[in-house]
Image (tube, rainbow, N blue to C red):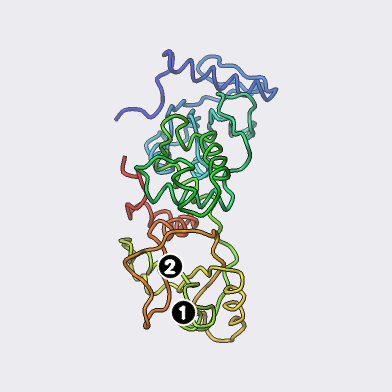
Amino acid sequence: MRSVFVTPHTQEHDELVDELVAALAALGVTASYVDDALVVDGARLPVGMVHRAHPTPADLAQLVADAPADVPAVVVADRVSEPGRAVLRKAGWGWLDRRGHVRIWAPGVRIESPVDGQGGGRRRGGNPWTTVGLETVLAVLVEPDLPATARRVAPLIGRSVGTVHEVIARLAAEGLVGRTTHRPLLPELFWEAAAHWPDGGWVALDVDLATVAERAGPGSVVRVDERAATLGGARIAAAGSFPVRAYIVGDSAFRKARSLAGGDGPTACLVRQAPVRWFPLNPDYPPDDERPWRVGHPLVCALRLAADPARGREIVESWGIVPGGDR
């Protein structure tokens, strides 16, 4: 089996070590590479160097599984997403994200910090993960083969061209959209969006979803639970046994739905205000007299599931719904 580590004493290995040492030096940390070990503030750390461009969380999990046990490692990559960092933290591995972040975690050394001046890819222009940012990403993910441009996306989500252009520029600064190709980086864009997808504030109700839809008003209830995911192709055992979950669209509608809370019966459904103003729906399941609610697009259901890393991530990865996830 080929080692996951870059072979020592090769040009590639030496260049990766030089990058790591330079990043630590930028933090004011004394570091060098001596006798096949990284020496950080006097602590000698034999580490394996791993080089990847844009590893997904699944890629990183596989690297950890394939690596020799108890051998600390540092992944050097153009970008390491937040979900990917969580995988590495759990394994006790470090990373150098060339956008400007380094982690070295070993006995006697605890470093996890942004690094200025790394790779020219530092984020600029603010946080892309606003409400408009999430709407923009949703529109891009639904049609991943089309260019991510403001003129295409803005009319679709009902936002100004200037605002969407700024969001796309921020995503490009994160390395998630090509600066010249305008193509999304997949599946990384999905997993990064999932890491920022709001999923708190659910309100438990002891009434069924039809009652919620009647109280909240026509068109305001969108089902996004495991059952909705199966309607989009997900394979989830006993999906009907999970609590019904639905987004409520609009402030007034959510207040009306929330007024149903407080009963002493068992929880029949969970509702929360929709985390975004615009999101796509599953066109194959429109509301009818029997089911007076809409169904979220499979990608919306996938993002909600993936926001739960303990269980949902595995479901989403086996579903195959993530654009570019099979590469």
- Residue that carries the numbered disc 1 in the rendered image: 209
233 relative position to 263: left or right: left
Q: Which quarter of the figure is the N terminus placed in?
A: top left
The residue drawn where x is 51% and y is 52% is 135
Q: For numbered disc 2, what is the local secondary structure?
A: loop
**Which quadrant of the view contains residue 251?**
bottom right
Q: Position of residue 309 (x, y in %)?
A: 48, 54
233 relative position to 29: left or right: left
Question: Mark 2 or mark 1, which has the lower sequence index?
Answer: 1
Is the Cβ of the residue at disc 2 closer than 8 Å to that at disc 1? no
Q: Position of residue 243 (x, y in %)?
A: 46, 74
Is label 2 or label 1 in front?
A: 1
Amino acid at the residue labelled 2? Asp
Determine which of the numbered discs, if any, sits on residue 225 in the image.
2
**Which quadrant of the view contains residue 6?**
top left
Determine which of the numbered discs, if any, sits on residue 224 in the image.
none
Q: CA distance from mark 2 to mark 1?
A: 12 Å
Which residue is most to the right? 28
Q: Position of residue 232 (x, y in %)?
A: 33, 62
Amino acid at the residue labelled 1? Leu
